[in-house]
Image: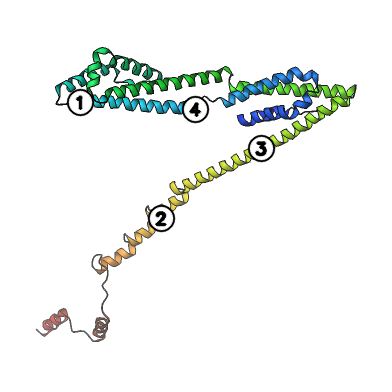
Amino acid sequence: MLINQRILVLMRSLHDDEHLGFGTTMIDEIGADVALLPALTDKWEAYKAVVNREQLLFSVSKASVETGDIRGFDKRRDLIFREMRHRLKFYSRSPDALVAKAAAELLFVMHPFDDTANRNLFGETAYVGKMLAKLDEAEHAEAVNRIYGFRQMMTELGATNEALAERYNQRLHAVEEADSLGRRLDVRREADRRIVDIFDAMNAFDTVNELTAKDAGLREPLHRIAAFVHAMVQQIERNLSHRRKHKRKKDDTSSGDNKAEKASGGTPSGDNKGKKESGGTPSGDNKGGKGSGSTPPGDNKTEKGSGGGRPAETLPSAQKNSDSTASATPSAPSVSAEVNVRTTNN
């Protein structure tokens, strides 16, 4: 087989930009050799058309440039709308009766549109346009002119609203253009099918040529194309291998960090033992606790004999010597002995 079909499996693992790069590179590099194979002209032109469609689809993003402008205009529009209402509320408390009346009139006109800022872009644009048309009616002209700077704010709000509507329509056209090209995944699959179809035809041409005519004019372009495709396949395999290694290394690093967090934040079994030794009371320490906190049987006897649980007091050395001297000297007769002597004499 001239061209190995594993390229189809590899192409499915490519990112969108890599897949597009493969298509454009094939067109640039093997186009001249394919032109020497008239039987592949139709297949090659169809493949080029699909790659061009993929390139257009890649360049047209639904998150278009207009999105940033739309957000900016929307914030500006909401700010002007709130400022208009605040100004009218401020002038409605004016000591000038005519100014207060004009402010109250305009607040009444704006009241049905109080929730304008909470609507979606399309609905808010329509509401703002309708509100400005109401305020611009002839019957409210005197009131608008009486509130300082109010007409200028109306003009600025209208200009911002129109700019937002223009950008919004431009984005709709961009999205429509992207949708007309089809889904990117479908275009990728179509490109893969067409290039594989071309490779199958090349393999068939090479097999027939080697079995029959052995035409060098056919063999040379086929082998040049095959050599380039094999080089591309090897490069793709290296790229994918590097990507897998990088992903595996990243996963190992994240799993190691998780283990470290568990070791510091959680409580492994070894730490439980340490906690039991310090805070709790393991079985081995209960015995020591009885010796230190409570009283074992032998110590209880000693405490009872010494007077009820109080530890024996330490005597000074002089007192110890006097006590030892006193114990060496014969003691005086006891009271009971003296009573016995008296009884005998009587």
Q: How many marks?
A: 4
Secondary structure at numbered mark 4:
loop
What amino acid is at disc 1? Answer: Tyr
Secondary structure at numbered mark 1:
helix
What's the CA distance linking mark 2 and mark 3?
Answer: 55 Å
User: Can residue 31 be seen in the rendering of this structure?
Assistant: yes
Secondary structure at numbered mark 2:
helix
Of labels 3 and 1, earlier in sequence is: 1
What amino acid is at disc 3? Answer: Asn
Residue receiving disc 2? 277
What's the CA distance linking mark 4 and mark 2?
Answer: 65 Å
Percent across and percent down for residue 138 are 26, 13
Q: Is 82 on the left or on the right of 250, as rendered?
A: left
Percent across and percent down for residue 182 are 59, 19
Quadrant containing the N terminus is: top right
Asked if labels 4 and 3 touch by Cβ distance under 8 angstroms, the answer is: no
Asked if labels 2 and 4 touch by Cβ distance under 8 angstroms, the answer is: no
Percent across and percent down for residue 344 are 13, 83
Q: Is 132 on the left or on the right of 249, as rendered?
A: left
| Residue in front for this viewpoint, 278 or 221 | 221
Residue receiving disc 3? 239
> Viewer-nearest of labels 2 and 1?
1
Quadrant containing the C terminus is: bottom left
- Which mark identifies residue 65? 4
Residue receiving disc 1? 91
> Viewer-nearest of labels 3 and 4?
4
What's the CA distance linking mark 4 and mark 1?
Answer: 40 Å
